[in-house]
Amino acid sequence: MSQPPTRRGLLRLAAVTAAAAPLTNAALPAHAAPAGEAPPPPPARATAAPVPAPPTWAVHPFPLDRVTLGDGVFRRKRDLMLDYARSYPADRILAVFRANAGLDTRGARPPGGWETSDGNLRGHYGGHFLTLVAQAYADTGEAALKTKLDYLVGALGECQTALAEHGSPRPSHPGYLAAYPETQFILLESYTTYPTIWAPYYTCHKIMQGLLDAHTLAGNGQALEIASKMGDWVHSRLGPLPKARLERMWSIYIAGEYGGMNEVLADLYALTGREEHLTAARCFDNTVLLDACAEDRDILEGRHANQHIPQFTGYLRLFDHTGEEEYAAAARNFWGMVAGPRMYSLGGTGQGEMFRARGAVAATLDDNNAETCATYNMLKLSRQLFFREPDAARMDYYERGLTNHILASRRDAAGADSPEVTYFVGMGPGVQRDYGNTGTCCGGTGMENHTKYQDSVYFRSADGNALYVNLYLASTLRWPERGFVIEQASEYPAEGVRTLTFREGSGRLDLRLRVPAWATGGFTVTVNGVRQQAEAVPGSYLTLSRSWRRGDRIRISAPYRLRIERALDDPSVQSVFHGPVLLVARSPEQGFRAFSFYKDFTLRGDLADAIQPEGRPSHFTTHGLTLAPFHVADNTRYHAYFKRAEPVIVFGTTDSGVPNRARGDGLTFLDVLWERAPFATSGRFVQEVRTLADGWLSGGLLTRTERDRVIAAAVGADLRH
């Protein structure tokens, strides 16, 4: 049975036929500032109005404007996206909305891609652009960004009014706002499939979320009014429908994709207090999958990944408001079905937009893995879970996905007419990243990704008595409620000492420092030069409890180690990391490169014996190839995975001649041996070889003669240097 066409495939068609001429509909006058005339200047920096944190949260985030990025690669990539936010014309974003509402498009043409004058997803990119500009304003406080945001919101308000008064056809409710008529929503209710219609509620979510962000991040009151009316329209449309019809709608491939409608409506309810908005949020219960995940039954194989990931963030928000445990259990279990069992080394998931079988990693490597939208949504889900249950595993995943997928998804070059971000990120041998994605889903989330890097660096406990340091990014936290200003100096993602300095404020505070799961080479903390004796367990938080004073300095050292990670379904297919950083081999070859490391090991059993520094920070060489950090984003072909080739049991230059056989779990004799390293002495090494060889003999994996040859080779080897 053939697969339905992918959105990526249709993008290629859309790119060919994207509107090159401006929309010219001028049936009604527009009431925004005339072309060429600047809107009125904005007031002083607006006060953000965040969604209230519910009592179910043990941990709270800081508003985006409380954390400022310091120098480094995160800031450089953010600045590239800020330039796009500043320069991209607002009227191009508004063109499809104005045309649908019968308003003058001011000669502007739509962005292109899926965002065309006749595209079935038109309007979604505008929602993402609202979020981009709102985040950019919250980050920088630039008046021009606030002016641009207010102009966008005001124009959308005019479109909503025009549709209600003069729409053709007239919407069913005056709160309707979209860039196409209500027809797509009506057709969905009769189970029309994709691509005849294309995810109408997905588009609705992006617009509503962008409006809420304009309100919560930039204090635009009109944005909340528009979104509230849209929520009323959603309730009027879905509220009367029987549950069976809703469930069937949401089960339809892509046409039933609704993004985070349940999340945005739950957040809207938190801001408005209107029960209709909470009722509308519950209309998006995707019951079959919700029930299965609540029961921890994994039925994800073959489902569209990004169609379902954001639903679970919405379920958590519904749990906050209803207390119904099924919602929270489903979200926890779903996360566990993806983060690990269906995760590539960069943190992304999916092949060709679809979830594949649990554990199928090596079997699915090609050029269309890891849709970037999916990682965007997995990071949102991870932080939402952390707010309720501050488990370090969530932040270990968050760091992996942020550093190795999201940071790597923005090309290291300017782009005035494109966000220059990835869609799929291939994990197969010899693939390359494609950038651009104007008008696509990943272009939209990509705009957001790079203007909110700081949103999870620090969290605070609900009572304000503890500060969580989750990520070691150069940044400054301003916490006026406690009077603290804390500066973090860091070269992350490069290796180095991280320093936290209390620049302002004093008082008692529990400082909770994340000890990353990869920090197996040690995690040392000093306060004002005095080493702390607190136990640092990888994959947990280390707590420093004291009364802090201005000038106090905490230094954190977590040396990076080279390490490999094995694919779940084939341990011989591996990736190599330097601490948290995925390293990729730069090579155009289309087949797996074969790497052999054990022959170079000394008694310490460290990959550093086999992989050499190249001379540039975080760059290495092995087997004649350069290993580079994946976040260096260009078009060079790369290998994120290689094939481990250790055919014979060899210790240094001493070859036993015995095959390096694997046991049932795929691990070879040498794999198991070197997992026991380091070895204090040559005698200890020989003892471990002898013990393991006896076990391999008992298991039928070595003959007695082979066992003796392996031990003799160990005795004759000199691995001290």
Image (cartoon, rainbow, N blue to C red):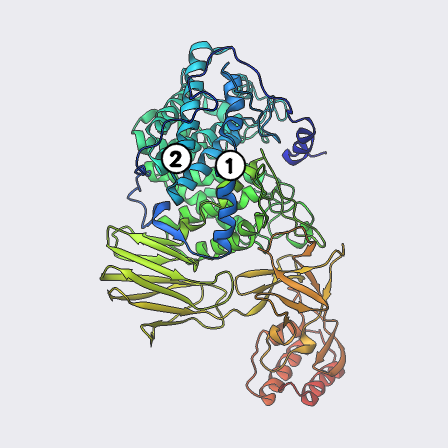
Circle 2 crowding by C-alpha within 10 Å: few under 14, some 14–19, many from 20: many
- Place residue 690 in its image quadrant: bottom right
Instruction: In the rendered view, tell whether residue 684 sits above or below residue 595.
Output: below
For the residue pair 388 and 366, the one nearer the viewer reads as: 366
Q: What residue appears at the point 44 percent right and 55 percent down from the top-left corner?
A: 395
Q: Secondary structure at mark 2?
A: helix
Q: Which mark is residue 146?
A: 2
Whether pointer 1 and pointer 2 mark residues with C-beta atoms closer than 8 Å, the reply is no
Kindly state the secondary structure of the residue where label 1 is placed.
helix
Query: Which amino acid type is shown beneath numbered disc 2?
Result: Lys
Judged left or right of residue 312, residue 114 is: right
Quick check: 527 above or below 593? Answer: below
Q: Earlier in the sequence, mark 1 or mark 2?
A: 1
Residue at image mark 1 = 87
* Residue at figure coordinates x 55%, y 23% from the top left: 108
Kind of residue indicated by mark 1 = Ser
